[in-house]
Amino acid sequence: MSEHEREETETQEQRNLGFWLYLMSDAVIFALLFATYAIMIRGTDGGPTGKQLFDLNNAALETVLLLVSSTTFGFASLSARTGNRGGAIGWLAVTFLLGVGFVFLEVREFAGMIAVGAGPDRSGFLSAFFTLVGTHGVHVTMGLLWILIMSAQIVLKGLTAPVVSRLYRLGLFWHFLDIAWVGIFSIVYLPGLL
Amino acid sequence: MEQHGLRTYLIGFVLAVVLSVIPFWLVATHALPPRRTLLIIGIAALLQVMVHLRFFLHLNFRTTPKENMLALMFTTLMIFIMVGGSYWIMFDLHQRMMT
């Protein structure tokens, strides 16, 4: 390994640690939004409760989309590591479409709730719900944007070491969002519909 | 970096599916009393988070840098203190307001 390559590897490793630290701070934000939600859950102010508003099938479908997208992202990472450019872009495209499906379902759910007067301004419970689930949705949307940028970089620059390294960090982000979703369906939707 | 192949992702996927289907199925069918269902939802969620960390984020005690593991453990501690503390304060306050 040349001096330049070693420096390059070191820089990428530092970036990996930095990004990991960002994810940990993001985990703290999500944990506190979960705590807020759990505390506000009874604060419905006589308005609709989770049981009346949530739809189990919708939550299940969102879970499927995000879990499959996490797996297809894994396939993209594998393709990128073996230098398979077409495979990496193809799997990223599949991941992107699944993510778009997820965001679509979430926006449709939000719009449906707001249409029946159950928006974030209705009660403390709904404020906490929209903040928690909405924050996750914004993260997924940012992830989608990042997937587009990453795909463009793979097309334009090829699978160079910096590009593969960035793809690795995008993978951390995407898999992390699936973990946050496990928390959301286990704390918001399932107990709400019990 | 450890070489994690296709198998790792597929094992993770299957485990995550199993750990999602169980709680969703219990809520859909009301097969168990609510308290027990809640407990199972909690256990399945914790297990699934660990499955994701191990099979998708490839966290393990051999190849993951020590700094990353330390950061994760510190974050877990912080979350425990902040979430547990919020709960403690709010429920104590609730009790005092009610009596």
Image (cartoon, rainbow, N blue to C red):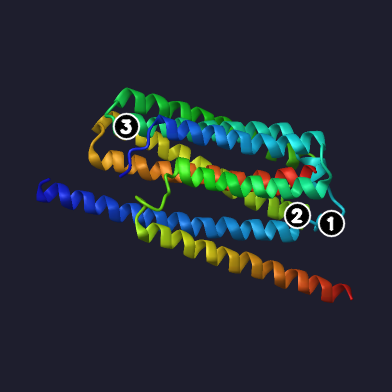
The residue type indicated by label 3 comes to: Ala
Which quadrant holds residue A112?
top right
Q: Residue at x 77, y 73 (%)?
A: B92
- The answer to whether residue B91 of the structure is visible from this angle is yes
Q: Position of residue B16 (x, y in %)?
A: 57, 37
Pick whichever of labels 3 and 2 is earlier in the sequence.
3
Q: Residue at x 37, y 45 (%)?
A: A169
Q: Secondary structure at mark 3?
A: helix
Q: Which residue is mark 3?
A: A80
Q: Residue at x 50, y 62 (%)?
A: B75
Q: Is residue A55 above or below residue A173?
A: above
Asked whether the beta carbons under mark 1 and mark 2 sit within 8 Å of each other, the answer is: yes
The label on residue A45 is 1
Q: Which residue is mark 2?
A: A125
Distance between mark 1 and mark 2 Cα atoms: 8 Å
Instruction: Work out which quarter of the rendered image holds the N terminus of chain A and state it.
Output: top left
Distance between mark 3 and mark 2 Cα atoms: 43 Å
Q: Position of residue A76 (x, y in %)?
A: 39, 31
Residue extending farthest front:
B62
Residue extending farthest right:
B99
Residue extending farthest left:
A2
Instruction: Work out which quarter of the rendered image holds the C terminus of chain A and state it.
Output: top right
Q: Residue at x 48, y 31 (%)?
A: B10
